[in-house]
């Protein structure tokens, strides 16, 4: 079943992508939830026209995302947490990284950051998706909080 996505769907595609999925997934989940619409010939023509019109705006968004990426690469991120013997009391998640970026002036939602759950002191990398075409690897360090 061919569908046109109306919004980003994790592990499937981005808005305005044409995807092929199994009939049940499309009919029972994507279409009723409003995530997708059937890819009829007329819908494909409308999509092609919309994509032509969006191309210029899209390029500006990519350029802005690249500027943000350069400023993020310049940051040195250190997250101080309570730890004992190299192990953290708790964990560091995407939400913690998002808070640190927000305190540095970059408001990035935690759902666009993927780092996993970290439970030890050390250096790690997080993937930050600023745009569908701009994904950067952001290094950060977790250090023990001084008592």
Image: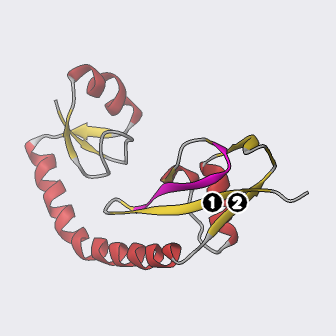
Q: Main secondary structure of the magenta part?
A: strand
Estimate how packed mark 1 is, as few (under 14), some (14 to 19) or many (20 or more) residues with alpha carbons within 10 Å. Answer: some
Identify the residue shown where x is 20% and y is 63%.
51
Q: Position of residue 7 (x, y in %)?
A: 36, 48
Q: Which residue is mark 2?
A: 79
Identify the residue shown where x is 31% and y is 51%.
15
**Quarter-wise, where is residue 76 in the image?**
bottom right
Q: Which residue is nearer to you in this view: 138 or 134?
A: 138
Q: Which residue is nearer to you in this view: 18 or 75?
A: 75
Looking at the picture, does residue 101 appear above or below residue 68? above
Instruction: Tell me the colour scheme of the image.
Output: secondary structure
Mark 1 lies on a secondary structure that is: strand
Q: Are marks 1 and 2 in contact (CB under 8 Å)?
A: yes
Mark 2 lies on a secondary structure that is: strand
Magenta range: 119-130
Label ID, residue 141: 1
Based on the picture, tell me whether residue 122 belongs to the magenta stretch.
yes
Based on the picture, tell me whether residue 9 belongs to the magenta stretch.
no
Q: Quadrant of the C terminus?
A: bottom right
């Amino acid at each position: 079943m061919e569908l046109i996505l109306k919004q980003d769907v994790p592990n499937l595609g981005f808005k305005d992508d044409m995807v092929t999925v199994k009939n049940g997934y499309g009919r029972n989940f994507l279409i009723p939830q409003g995530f997708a619409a059937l890819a009829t010939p007329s819908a494909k023509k409308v999509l092609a026209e919309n994509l032509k019109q969006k191309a210029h705006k899209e390029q500006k968004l990519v350029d802005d995302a690249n500027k943000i990426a350069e400023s993020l690469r310049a940051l040195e991120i250190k997250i101080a947490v309570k730890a004992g013997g190299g192990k953290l009391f708790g964990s560091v998640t995407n939400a913690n990284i998002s808070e640190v970026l927000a305190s540095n002036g970059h408001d990035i939602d935690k759902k666009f950051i993927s780092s996993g759950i970290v439970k030890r002191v050390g250096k790690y990398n997080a993937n930050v998706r600023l745009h569908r075409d701009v994904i950067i690897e952001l290094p950060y360090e977790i250090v023990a909080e001084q008592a």
